Image: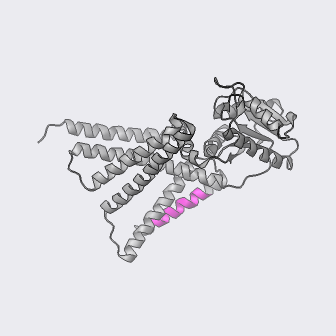
C-alpha cells in the first residue's frame, strides 16, 4: 500500500510538471499536482509509521486536521478585521471572515465526530456530509492556490506585440493605488517589449462606472503619458465591464490596428491575486498570452484571492460540480429517508 501511494503520487506530480511546462494556464493542473502531493504525504507518513513503529489512530488524525483548520480559520477572521478597518465593509472584505468561520465550524464538527459525541445518528450523518462538502471546497481552494503560486514563479518573456493592462476601478477621475501598481508593472513590460519587438502597443482596458468621473481606459492613458509612454502607442478599450470583456474587446481593438488574434503575442498585466483566472481566460479565447501580476498589499491578498476563487468556482469545474452535487443530493436523500423511517 505504501509503495502504491508513493508511486502514484510521483506519477501524478510528474504529470503535473509536464502539464505546467506544456500549458501552464490549464486550471485542472492544480488538482493533478495537489493529488500527487497528498498521495506522497500519505505514503511518507505510512512509511514512517512502518519504519518507526508509530501508531496513528483515526481520532488522532482527525484532531490534527481539526486543529489545523481552526488555526487557519482564526487567522482568516483576524485578517478580515484588518481588511474591513482599512478598506471598508463589502462582500470581498468580509469573505475571509465567512471562510474562516466555516473552517472553525468544520473543525468543531470533525472533533465531535472523532470523539463520538452522543447525538442522533441523522445528525452525525449530516455532520459527516457537511465536512465532506467543506473538504471538497478546501481541496479546490488548495489546488487553485498552489497552482496560482506556481504560475507566478514562471519566467516571463520580454517579447510582446501588445501589453494589455486590466482596469480595476477609479477614485473619481484618478487611478487608485491598486491600479497604479498595474500600470507601473505594465510600463516595465512595455519597455522590455520595446527592446525585442518593433513598435509594441500598450492597451488600457476599462469602461466608466456609475461613481467614476471618466472611463478607466482614459485615466490609465493619462497616467501612462505622464510617465513618458508615447501617446501613439496607447490603445484605449473604453467599454468593458469585466475581465472577459477586457480580453474580447481588446482583441477587437488590436485587430483594427492590424494585429490579428491568431498571431499576436500578448502580455496581460493585472494584480497578483488575479493572474491565474486571467490566464485561464486567455487560454479559453485561444491567444498566445502570458499574464504577469503587480504586487498587492499583503493584508488584502486573502480577501482578493478568495473572491477570485469564488469567481473560478462559478465559471470552471462544471462537470466536477455537477457530479459532486448529484452525489450530495443522493446522500441527503438517503439520510432524510432513513430519518423518516419509523423506529424499530
Q: Is residue 125 magenta?
A: no
- Left or right, residue 239 beside residue 123: right
Quadrant containing the C terminus is top left
Residue at 34 percent across and 58 percent down: it is 62
Relative vertical location of residue 60 with respect to residue 178 in this rendering, above or below? below
Q: Position of residue 61 (x, y in %)?
A: 35, 61
- The span shown in magenta is 3-17
Q: Position of residue 18 (x, y in %)?
A: 62, 57
Is 14 in the magenta? Answer: yes
Q: In which quadrant of the rendered view does residue 199 lie?
A: top right
Predominant SS of the magenta segment:
helix
Task: Residue lying at the far bottom in this picture: please name it.
Answer: 52
Q: Is residue 330 left or right of residue 285?
A: left
Give how far across and how far down residue 194 sits, in percent: 85, 46
Viewer can see residue 158: yes
Q: Is residue 260 visible?
A: no
**As rendered, which of 250 and 338 lies closer to the eye?**
250
Residue 151, image x, y percentages: 63, 52
Could you tell me which residue is drawn at 66 percent across and 40 percent down?
178
For image coordinates 37% across by 60% down, the residue present is 64
Q: Residue at x 47, y 47 (%)?
A: 78
Is 264 located above or below residue 253 in the figure?
Answer: below
Front-lying residue, 193 or 337: 193
Colour scheme = one colour
All told, the count of numbered labels is: 0
In the displayed orientation, state which residue is furthest to the front. Answer: 85
For the N terminus, give its image quadrant. bottom left
Quarter of image, res 101: top left
Q: From the viewer's perspective, is 344 left or right of 234?
A: left
> For this rendering, which residue is in front, 103 or 6?
103
Amino acid at each position: 500500500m505504501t509503495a502504491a501511494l508513493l508511486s502514484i503520487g510521483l506519477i501524478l506530480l510528474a504529470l503535473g510538471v509536464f502539464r505546467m511546462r506544456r500549458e501552464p494556464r490549464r486550471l485542472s493542473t492544480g488538482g493533478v499536482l495537489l493529488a500527487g502531493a497528498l498521495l506522497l504525504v500519505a505514503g511518507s507518513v505510512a512509511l514512517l509509521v512502518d519504519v518507526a513503529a508509530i501508531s496513528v489512530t483515526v481520532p488522532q488524525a482527525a484532531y490534527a486536521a481539526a486543529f489545523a483548520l481552526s488555526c487557519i480559520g482564526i487567522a482568516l477572521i483576524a485578517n478580515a478585521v484588518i481588511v474591513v478597518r482599512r478598506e471598508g465593509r463589502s462582500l470581498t472584505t468580509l469573505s475571509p471572515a465567512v471562510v474562516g468561520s466555516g473552517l472553525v465550524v468544520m473543525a468543531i464538527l470533525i472533533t465531535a465526530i472523532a470523539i463520538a459525541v452522543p447525538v442522533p445518528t441523522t445528525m452525525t450523518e449530516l455532520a459527516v456530509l457537511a465536512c465532506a462538502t467543506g473538504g471538497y471546497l478546501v481541496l479546490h481552494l488548495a489546488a487553485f492556490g498552489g497552482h496560482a503560486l506556481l504560475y507566478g514563479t514562471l519566467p516571463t518573456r520580454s517579447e510582446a506585440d501588445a501589453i494589455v493592462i486590466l482596469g480595476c476601478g477609479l477614485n473619481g477621475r484618478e487611478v487608485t493605488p491598486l491600479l497604479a501598481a498595474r500600470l507601473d508593472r505594465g510600463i516595465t513590460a512595455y519597455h522590455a517589449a520595446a527592446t525585442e519587438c518593433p513598435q509594441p502597443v500598450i492597451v488600457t482596458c476599462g469602461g466608466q462606472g456609475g461613481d467614476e468621473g471618466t472611463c478607466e481606459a482614459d485615466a490609465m492613458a493619462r497616467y501612462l503619458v505622464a510617465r513618458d509612454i508615447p501617446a501613439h502607442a496607447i490603445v484605449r478599450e473604453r467599454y468593458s465591464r469585466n475581465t472577459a470583456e477586457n480580453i474580447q474587446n481588446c482583441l477587437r481593438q488590436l485587430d483594427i490596428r492590424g494585429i490579428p488574434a491568431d498571431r499576436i503575442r500578448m502580455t496581460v498585466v493585472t494584480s497578483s491575486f488575479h493572474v491565474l483566472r486571467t490566464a485561464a481566460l486567455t487560454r479559453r479565447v485561444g491567444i498566445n498570452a502570458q499574464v504577469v501580476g503587480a504586487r498587492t498589499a499583503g493584508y488584502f491578498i486573502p480577501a482578493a484571492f478568495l473572491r477570485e476563487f469564488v469567481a473560478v468556482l462559478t465559471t470552471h469545474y462544471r462537470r466536477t460540480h455537477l457530479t459532486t452535487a448529484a452525489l450530495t443530493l443522493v446522500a441527503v436523500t438517503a439520510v432524510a429517508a432513513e430519518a423518516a423511517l419509523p423506529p424499530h
